[in-house]
Amino acid sequence: MNFHVNIALHYLKPKNSSFISLLSFISILDITIGVMALIIIISVMNGLNHTLEKRVIGIESQLIVLNYNGFIDHYKKAIRKVSSISGVKSVSPFIYTDVMISSASTSEGSILRGIDIKTEEKGTDLKKYLVNGNLSELNNRKKNEIVLGKNSLKASSSIFHITPSLS
């Protein structure tokens, strides 16, 4: 028999009464249940972490290059520079600013994120989360259309947005 098994059996066998054996059994059972619970919790948390990471990365970039003093003057040059880094799968420019959105019944502060449809579709799963319409319809420059978040203003025939000075 294996050396380790012999030592384990030596300490698990009752010497005088069966009470010690019962305590040993309960102790081993407690440790087994505790380890099983830890393994299950770690597995669930890893799955949750993977799911959340996949959803967040699906709509938000892992790296955002900003100029806090305003716009990036030569953004095409910056795009080429970031694209040349190994491991970068896609690069998409965007405009990010605070706005006030109002309709006939209400108004609220929001964030306006102007995206380039062609490059955004390569790097994110944004179209997967659209409820109505599709991103390709937004590429028509003759229409003034936007994508509103689920918790934004209720559907209205027209909305107005007010932005701070962009200069």
Image (cartoon, rainbow, N blue to C red):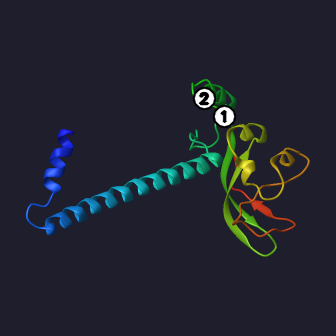
Q: To which quarter of the image does residue 38 belong?
A: bottom left
Q: Is residue 41 left or right of residue 121?
A: left
Residue at (21, 45) in percent of width and height: 5
Q: Is residue 84 above or below residue 153?
A: above
Can you tell which mark lies on residue 91? 1
Task: Between residue 110 and residue 23, name the one nearer to us.
Answer: 23
- Disc 1 marks which amino acid? Val
* SS at badge 1: loop
Judge whether residue 165 can be spotted in this image: no
Judge whether residue 134 can be spotted in this image: yes
Which residue has dot 2 on it? 82
Task: Between residue 150 and residue 38, name the one nearer to us.
Answer: 38
- Percent across and percent down for residue 143 are 90, 51
Q: Is residue 48 above or below residue 109?
A: above
Q: Is residue 32 left or right of residue 10?
A: right
Task: Locate the N terminus and report the quarter of the image it occupies.
Answer: top left
- Disc 2 marks which amino acid? Val
Q: To which quarter of the image does residue 148 belong?
A: bottom right
Task: Between residue 11 and residue 101, name the one nearer to us.
Answer: 11
- Percent across and percent down for residue 99 are 69, 59
> Dot 2 surroundings within 10 Å: few (below 14), some, or many (20 or more)?
some
> Dot 1 surroundings within 10 Å: few (below 14), some, or many (20 or more)?
some
Residue at the left extreme? 16
User: CA–CA distance between discs 1 and 2?
Assistant: 7 Å
- Percent across and percent down for residue 24 are 19, 62
Q: To which quarter of the image does residue 93 belong?
A: top right
Identify the mark nearer the N-term, 1 or 2: 2
Residue at (71, 48) in percent of width and height: 126
Residue at (52, 54) in percent of width and height: 48
Q: Are marks 1 and 2 in contact (CB under 8 Å)?
A: yes
Residue at (76, 55) in percent of width and height: 130
Residue at the bottom extreme? 105
